[in-house]
Amino acid sequence: MTARTLITVPKGAKRGDIVEIRALVQHPMETGYRRSSEGAMLARDLIRTFSCRFVSAASASTDAAGELVFAATLHAAIAANPYLSFNLRADASGSLVFEWLGDNGFAHRETVALLVA
């Protein structure tokens, strides 16, 4: 399943600024407890984890995994199309790598640049 995302990262930031990062992924988040209109149980389909890593432009070749800056474990009570927002101190330019993992082999990754002056 290919997911659509909406990620908001400031176009630029000053060194030391606290910036807000927002991420939304389109996903049905089916709990496995509901029935279809025909009465059949709908299979569980949840996003289980979300993580955001920062890979600085200076260390991109040596540290491909990056530094974990935010992570969340999601459960059945989370709404469809989960939206997450968190703050990050902008110390250097680099890339933010967003990753969602879930049931039924769901995995989606997006990379967005963060420019720091």
Image (cartoon, rainbow, N blue to C red):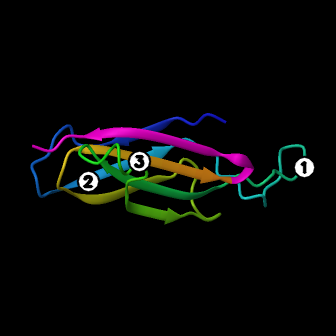
Residue under numbered circle 2: 20
Q: Earlier in the sequence, mark 1 or mark 2?
A: 2
Q: Is any part of residue 6 visible from this angle?
A: yes
> Separation of disc 3 and disc 2 at Cα?
23 Å
> Separation of disc 1 and disc 2 at Cα?
43 Å
Q: Amino acid at mark 2?
A: Glu
- 69 up-or-down from 101: above or below: below
Q: Nearer the viewer, residue 45 or 13?
A: 13
Of marks 1 and 2, the one in the foreground = 2
Q: Amino acid at mark 3?
A: Ala
Q: Callout 1: few (<14), some (14-19), or many (20+) C-alpha neighbours within 10 Å?
A: few
> Separation of disc 1 and disc 3 at Cα?
47 Å
Report the disc number at residue 64: 3
Q: Earlier in the sequence, mark 1 or mark 3?
A: 1
Residue 67 falls within the magenta-colored stretch: no
Q: Amino acid at mark 1?
A: Gly
Numbered range of the magenta stretch: 103-117
Q: Residue at x 90, y 49 (%)?
A: 40
Residue under numbered circle 1: 39
Quarter of the picture containing the C terminus is: top left
Task: Determine the image quadrant of residue 85.
Answer: bottom left
Q: Is residue 111 left or right of residue 40?
A: left
Q: Position of residue 73 (x, y in %)?
A: 54, 65
Residue at the front extreme? 62
Q: Residue at x 65, y 63 (%)?
A: 76
Q: Earlier in the sequence, mark 3 or mark 2?
A: 2
Of marks 1 and 3, the one in the foreground = 3
